[in-house]
Image (cartoon, rainbow, N blue to C red):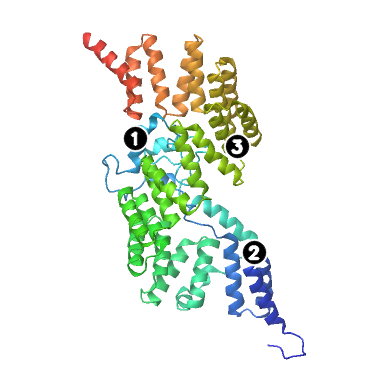
Amino acid sequence: MSTPGSAPTATVDSMFYAVDHFHKRNFEKCAAICTELLAKNPYDKAAWTLKMRSLTSQLSVDDLEAEEEGIADSVLDTNTIATAARPGTSLKTAAVTAPALTSRPRTESGRPVSGVVRPGTLASRGGTLEQSLKTPRTAKSARPLTSQAARTIRLGTASMLSQPDGPFIQVSRLNLAKYARDKTVAKYLFEYLYHHENDVASAMDLAVESTKACEFRDWWWKVQLGKCYFSLGLIREAQQQFNSALNQFTDIEAFIRMIRVYIRLDQPIRAIDIGRNALDCYPNEVTIMTEMARIFEGLNNMPMSVKYYKLILKRDATCMEAIACIGVNHFYNDQPEVALLFYRRLLQMGLYNAELFNNLALCCFYSQQYDMVVTCFERALSLALNENAADVWYNISHVAIGISDTRLAIQCLHLALSIDSSHGLSQNNLAVLEAREGHIERASTYLQAAAASSPYLYETHYNQAVISNLAGDLQESYNIVKKSLDLHPGHSYSWDILRKLEQYFSYL
């Protein structure tokens, strides 16, 4: 330290300013000061560690909310236990057998719509590799081939921009066993390797050495090792590490990651049991209740999902996911007035996008508050981008159908198709309107296009069966209506056509 009356020591002042900038989250200034200190003394351990933490903080993301199951992870999965799971015990079969499909539509990738878009809601868990690859690659349904592809590109680019003269640390030259024994540096180095460099393999090696160095007594390293295993697709190994960590310490992150493991293994009942055990330890933890609500929503058990979302709102009244999911549940249960209250709450909280104004317009229309419908749709169109403008025009067509303006509805559906030519819902509704006008051939063309672009829509196959039946092509109608029942076994109108055709064929 400097003596009274003398000039302050530059090194001490610089380190003080670097720490001050770090606490104020001015990470770039902190890294710049640490770079100057390292230029003077390359072996300054404090400056090296602080710069490593500042670079990590610039790029670290909540990887719990950034997990996306890729096509290779879901279709080429060898960890699933049951190939023919019982109803209600698998996330893959929940979307097919649930009766909620009669009221809640599905997304372009075949999943029932949820209140918010989050990782996993856009992925179609069932089906073959061919069906997954045929999924339209739009902003709403695009899926990475592997779960690491998107993060690798983003974090790798950011890493090169943060250090134009070269990487801050030569990872290949690190003696990981040496740094693993240094408890003051090891954890920060792991976070740097995992978040900044996105080098999961090196981070895993460091976690293995650190676990050995602490004689398997530090639960934190076991959680990080399990996280690396999970990222690399080693689900069973990750399960063992999280179990071992929970035996030592009941940590919230370990509980959540254990739940994610069982979701990846398609064992939602076991994941629910883990969540209930976690709530016994942390009764008011919002993140655990959010996981429980998401699992029940994935199983199409909407009453239980809404129950947990309501509990979340009692603990955290600003949770946008809970508000949106409860709102969409009320809307599809024919309670648009109640749903309107939740969406107005989101608007008051500062959410301002096309989807919210689109939902507000639909709630106003079905609750007969017609003075706000046009205004909300105009605001939604002004905020809409190419990936969601087609949905806005599609919903406007429903309003036009509700006021019996068929010409306006057809025009809106044409506008939706001009933005997204593979919008299956618009093609299906346009076919119905054309059939009502007597244009059967044109309607059949639209239905064929809808079946090709959106094979998960049972309405499209049912409409095709009706048109084929009217045209006298009974065999084609029989084949198509069976596809409709495969997608939605509880559709009564499809069963009526199938029984009539079977009765007719029995007379031949």
Residue at position x 66%, y 65% in the image: 26
Quarter of the image for the C terminus: give it.
top left
Q: Is residue 183 above or below residue 355?
A: below
Point out residue 5 in the picture as x, y percentages from the top left corner: 77, 90
Does residue 163 appear left or right of residue 320 in this picture?
right
Q: Which residue is mark 2?
A: 163
> Residue at point 30% right, 18% down?
498
Q: CA distance from mark 1 to mark 2?
A: 52 Å
Q: Do residues under tags 3 and 2 come within 8 Å of each other at their CB atoms?
A: no
- Which residue is denoted by mark 1 in the rendering? 98
Look at the image and tell me in which quarter the N terminus lies: bottom right
Q: Amino acid at mark 2?
A: Gln
The first of marks 3 and 2 along the sequence is: 2
Separation of disc 3 and disc 2 at Cα? 38 Å
The local secondary structure at tag 3 comes to helix
The residue depicted at 47 percent of the width and 49 percent of the height is 313
Residue 147 horizontal/vertical position (percent): 46, 50
Which residue matches tag 3?
354
Mark 1 and mark 2 in contact? Answer it, CB < 8 Å: no
Position above or below: 217 against 83: below
